[in-house]
Image: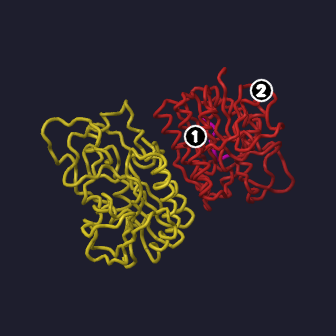
Chain colours: A yellow, B red
């Protein structure tokens, strides 16, 4: 890959997991709404490739997009409790700008950070907590209709629809990754749902690395590790992207029985 | 039905088809961005039940929603060529306001005017024009993922996702009607696509009448007449809503062979 890769939301949790894993493998352009502290930027990225901009600012996005071959688009309000005004602007309007400019500028591959919250509504009272357990074989595979669990999830479903449109209209390869619960070092403790959809940092970096290299048209895949508990299929990610996750939340044991609890604020 | 029915976008083409067909059957509240001329309002609707408001104005929407039992939500930018700023505001933001206020105010049934454009991308070069012909058995049935043909279609897919959320969260019955090509008196001439997805005025009024009376949870159905040419299934609308369309574009003959042409601007 000679052409630069634009990473939006570079300073966020997913962006940092990616840069920590594959930060040396690409010629990055890093975009974030806030200036990034030195600790969050790979040494090889010169100042000229660090963009401080709001993704709803089309001119700034177009400036950052010039000559880019691939995009990983993570920027947006990451809170599952984000209010409508914020997801409307930052996630829906912002994603439309980034995708359209990418398509118009001839970007080849576009990886969009969708979310488990785009389908959170499938976790009904009837299905939970069984859904989160190893012996339950219910699976979502990316072909099901969106069923958002909150307005943040609606914004991610909209991003997927935009991705479909810009793929169809411009031929840009678009993959929407419904990211699970990204935590560092170990899966969430005492949180069955989080263990079912755990995505380790190294599997996250590897998955987006595959998004930058595989051949695909339009895809919706789940971004989770190889968890025994899972109710998201990772077959499509394996088959189309060559995703080969190394981690499994079942390999981690915590004292006592897991409980079903809400995750900390701002986590999936 | 004793409780009033709120009709947003009452002055538009779909709203007028509904009012012409079942204008005497309900206690209407009519909302439109522009004052409606007398010719567009059933005689029985008093001035007090005519609201002139923008649907992004939450206070005005809440005022119109008080005591309402059902909603038919048509308001929005109807142009398939509508630019992003307009669909973002009028269709996405506006629909979120109307659906949320309806759910919060305890509305029982909510019919949302979605569109064939939410799935226009399935009409690929490979499939057309065969898709529009009687001997082709390809069918979309509402379980397929959104595949918008334009930004207007993205806004309709977003409305469907919002409807799913507000059904799941509040128990409000929500039906999304992917409306085909509504024309008066006869199907579009020399336009195979339009004949395949023709919706006659009387079938339109009947379909929304069923949306106000049937029992359902969350549904996505296609709103077309009983056309021989169709590639949208109407089985779900028949089964769940009791839709029983009377018209079929094949009953109309025009001189010469039909040609595939773009529809007039601002029509489906």
* Whether residue B10 can be seen here: yes
Residue shown at the point (39%, 63%) measured from the top left? A33
Q: CA distance from mark 2 to mark 1?
A: 28 Å
Mark 1, chain letter?
B
Highlighted range, magenta: B230-236
Residue A217 image point, x, y percent: 47, 63
Query: Which label belongs to residue B1?
Result: none
Q: Quadrant of residue B127?
A: bottom right
User: In the displayed image of the protein, which residue is found farthest to the top?
Assistant: B2
Q: Residue furthest right?
A: B255
Front residue of B192/B40: it is B40
CB within 8 Å, label 2 to label 1:
no
Tell me the SS state at disc 2.
Answer: loop
The dot on residue B24 is: 2
Q: Nearer the viewer, residue A268 or B60?
A: B60
Q: Nearer the viewer, mark 2 or mark 1?
A: 1
Give x and y (percent) for residue A74. Answer: 39, 60
Instruction: Answer yes or no: are tags 2 and 1 on the same subunit.
Output: yes
Is residue B206 shown in magenta? no
SS at mark 1 in the image? helix
Q: Is residue B227 left or right of residue B137?
A: right
Q: How far from the left and from the top, in percent, is residue A227?
A: 25, 48
Of residues A37 and A110, the one nearer the viewer is A37
- Name the subunit of mark 2: B
Residue at the image point whose x is 56% and y is 41% from the top = B97
Q: Which quarter of the image is occupied by the N terminus of chain A?
A: bottom left
Residue carrying label 1: B58
**Could you classify mark 1 by the number of other residues whose Cα lies within 10 Å: few (under 14), some (14-19), or many (20 or more)?**
some
Residue A49 placement: quadrant: bottom left
B226 vs A249, nearest the viewer: A249
**Residue A85 pos. (x, y %):** 49, 49
């Amino acid at each position: 890959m000679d052409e630069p890769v634009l990473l939006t939301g570079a300073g966020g949790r997913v962006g940092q997991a990616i840069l920590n894993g594959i930060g040396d493998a690409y010629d990055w352009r890093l975009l974030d709404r806030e200036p990034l502290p030195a600790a969050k930027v790979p040494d090889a990225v010169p100042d000229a490739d660090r963009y401080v901009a709001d993704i709803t600012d089309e001119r700034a996005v177009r400036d950052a997009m010039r000559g880019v071959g691939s995009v990983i688009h993570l920027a947006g309000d990451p809170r599952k409790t984000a209010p409508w005004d914020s997801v409307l602007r930052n996630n829906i309007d912002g994603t439309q700008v980034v995708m359209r400019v990418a398509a118009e500028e001839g970007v080849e591959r576009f990886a969009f950070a969708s979310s488990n919250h785009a389908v959170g509504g499938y976790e009904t009272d009837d299905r939970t907590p069984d859904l989160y357990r190893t012996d339950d074989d219910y699976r979502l595979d990316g072909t099901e209709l969106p069923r958002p669990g909150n307005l943040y999830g609606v914004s991610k479903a909209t991003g997927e629809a935009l991705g479909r449109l810009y793929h169809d209209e411009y031929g840009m390869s678009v993959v929407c990754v419904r990211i699970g619960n990204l935590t560092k070092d170990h899966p969430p403790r005492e949180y069955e749902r989080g263990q079912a959809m755990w995505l380790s940092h190294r599997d996250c970096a590897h998955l987006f690395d595959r998004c930058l290299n595989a051949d695909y048209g339009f895809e919706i895949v789940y971004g989770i590790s190889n968890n025994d508990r899972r109710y998201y299929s990772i077959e499509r990610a394996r088959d189309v992207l060559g995703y080969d996750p190394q981690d499994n939340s079942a390999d981690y044991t915590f004292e006592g029985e897991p409980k079903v609890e809400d995750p900390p604020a701002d986590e999936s």
